[in-house]
Image (cartoon, rainbow, N blue to C red):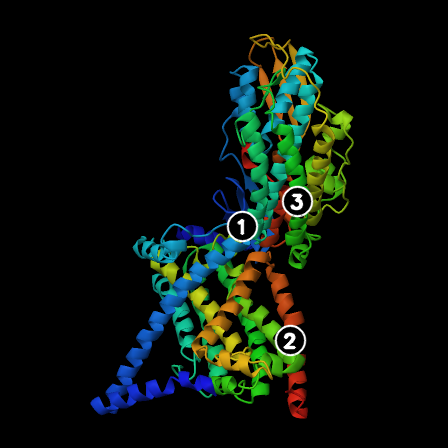
Amino acid sequence: MEEKVKNITADDQQEYVINMGPQHPSTHGVLRLVVSLKGEIVQNLIPHIGYIHRGIEKMCESITYPQIIHLTDRMDYLSAHINNEAVCLNVEKALEIDIPDRIKVIRTIMAELTRIQSHQLWWCSFGMDLGGLTCFFYGLRDREKILDIFEETCGGRMIVSYNCPGGLMYDIHPNFQKRVKEFINYFRKTLPEYDQLLTGNVIFKERTKGVGRLSLEDAIAYGATGPTGRASGFSCDVRKQEPYSAYDRVSFNEVLFNDGDTYHRYLARIAEMRESMDIIEQLIDNIPEGPYAVKMKPVIKLPEGEYYQRVETARGELGVYIISDGNKNPLRVKFRSPNFVNLSILNEISKGWKIADLVAIGGSLDLVIPDIDR
Amino acid sequence: MPFDIYDFTSLTKWIDTSLHSAMSPFWTTVTEMVIIGVLILLFYAIVGLFLVYAERKVCAFMQNRLGPNRVGPFGIFQTIADLIKLLFVELVPIKNADKFLFNLAPFIVIIASFMAIAAIPFALGLQAIDLNIGVLYIIAVSSMGVVGILIAGWSSNNKYSLIGAMRSGAQIVSYELSVGLALITVVILAGSLQLSTIVESQRDGWFLFKGHIPAFIAFILYMIASTAETNRGPFDLAEAESELTAGYHTEYSGIKFAFFFLAEYINMFIVASIAATVFLGGWMPFHVGGWEGFNHVMDFIPPFFWYLGKTAFVIFMMMWFKWTFPRLRIDQLLTLEWKYLLPINLVNVLFMSFIVLMGWHF
């Protein structure tokens, strides 16, 4: 012990090293950040990951394709539906199945609802990171309504597992359209409350404007996607660039800002909630008739080859890469998770900011740790 | 004045004389001290328990929830249940902590808040000690708490605690200036540092209304600075939950933690009661000029309830701040004090002196 003390004092760097996590209120999960401080200013930051590593990619190699879907729920649990969709789209692409419009439209509506509830939860926790504890309850109040819709249709509230290769597990609930419309009406009224409580607040603006700026070059170099990348002006919305499901038949704006600071990452997500509501409104009345699932073979075997499908989750671009050797199990599965990439920019943008800013920046990246570790 | 029927002086005089007739002057003083000590201790505990309950109910009200509602009707016994739990919780020993200072810190914090409560006039004649420098005494005593916080952070052998303690030191020392100057503004108007005189001279109108604009500015400045001085949100940097887990009291458990917790609420109570005493007329009833009947009814509400009501109003304001605003950053906090509040305060003191000199106040 004494030797250790001597070593620290002998070090002319004189950095104050603290461990943020794995149990820390604002790392949103079991992420451990080793932060070197000078006073309160962050000098360097090393993320230590793997505390919730479950080997999902390896597990995928020993199970069948329909089973993989249930594992993907557990990666980014806030975009569970979108993760499911990515695997399904990849399998369907490999098998060259034509998916009926009804499935596409329902998947899109569900994906956008998932995006809204994810951003709502992010808003809750971001407010709490900045010390505004009331935000948490405002956000959860509204999120509950979406989860109720999920519960009615999918059975699950958060881990929905609603997709299966070739369609959906079951048809939508008869109340689905009515309740989604009710929710949109309700949320159009309550979203301005979010702005009143946080966006317009002087302290909030002081805390976030100009903090943790991510330049466009860095965003592209690191591969930051989702609202994080788009706040820096990096046009990376997969829904626009490579439309899947029903995104080619709806009109919506890609939310783009140029500043790339914490404040604009915040605004990007708030604006995305509005865009998502627009998308749902365009589709909810026009769900075509038809089957909710295509008849598939009992054992799904992908032809030999490599398949890649990317989708836009609430946090950015999720890529599913499957190598198949013609068996009922994949030979190798790799997920390109948006959170892992977004975490890598944390050191770059939080250097030179205070520890309170580090919390704000970390919150604005909207990290979901199980998706990083997988 | 009709509310003089609620004068406590006759009661205290009677106790004093009857004690004097029974024993020697020395033992009389000792007995009186014990009585007052026990009363203050009781009051302290009741206020602490009530404020914790009130905070939980108020924040639940602001956050669309019910708050405590299981233990007793409307959950009123929740805080008592919590207190009992805290009493029985294990006191976790901390490795490599400075044991003496670690155990001393909660007592310093709680003694500082005890001492301040002694000088507050609760009602006519109900004041433990009426110092002729009451305002100065309260400012001096309430700033002792920061020593306890610094010791707690230093002795815990925890890096988060140390950061929290350092933040708290910088914050409280800075904001004390603003609290002091805001009170000085009113002292200039009142012409006295004695709290009973300050209350007495608000008989014909509260200083908030009597002192024109500068008194009003001083009140706002006092509210901001005192919220910061008590380490409450949006200035709760010392224990910033999302940054430092719990700041300076991270390592404390059980009853020692309860001491910090209680001291925080009592400090809020003290700060609010000073605001009520100095700006809102203390235990003086609310009067409107010309409305004789109304004023007469107001006079029959006992002064103690007037005092509690005003204090509760100020406390509610402080809770409202906490549950609405996000937290500031340490440099923004110090900027706010040194670049905005302090200059405004200095100008305000000058302004007030000018008004008093010209006799323009009401």
Q: Specify whether residue B234 is in view.
A: no
Residue assigned mark 3: A348
- Give residue B178's position: percent from left, percent from top: 59, 74
**For the residue labelled by badge 1, is the local secondary structure a helix, a strand or a loop?**
loop
- Amino acid type of disc 1? Asn
Disc 3 from disc 1: Cα separation: 39 Å
Residue A230 visible:
yes
Residue B64 badge: 1
Disc 1 is attached to a residue of which chain? Answer: B
The residue carrying mark 2 is B217
Label 3, secondary structure: give it. Answer: helix
Q: Which of A26 and B262 is in front in this view?
A: B262
Chain letter for the residue marked with disc 3 in the picture: A
Q: Residues within 10 Å of mark 1 (few under 14, many from 20)?
A: few
Taking B151 as reference, is A144 left or right? right
Q: What residue type is labelled 3?
A: Glu
Q: Are discs 2 and 3 located on one and the same chain?
A: no
From the top left corner, tell me how far across and down residue B226 is, in percent. 54, 70
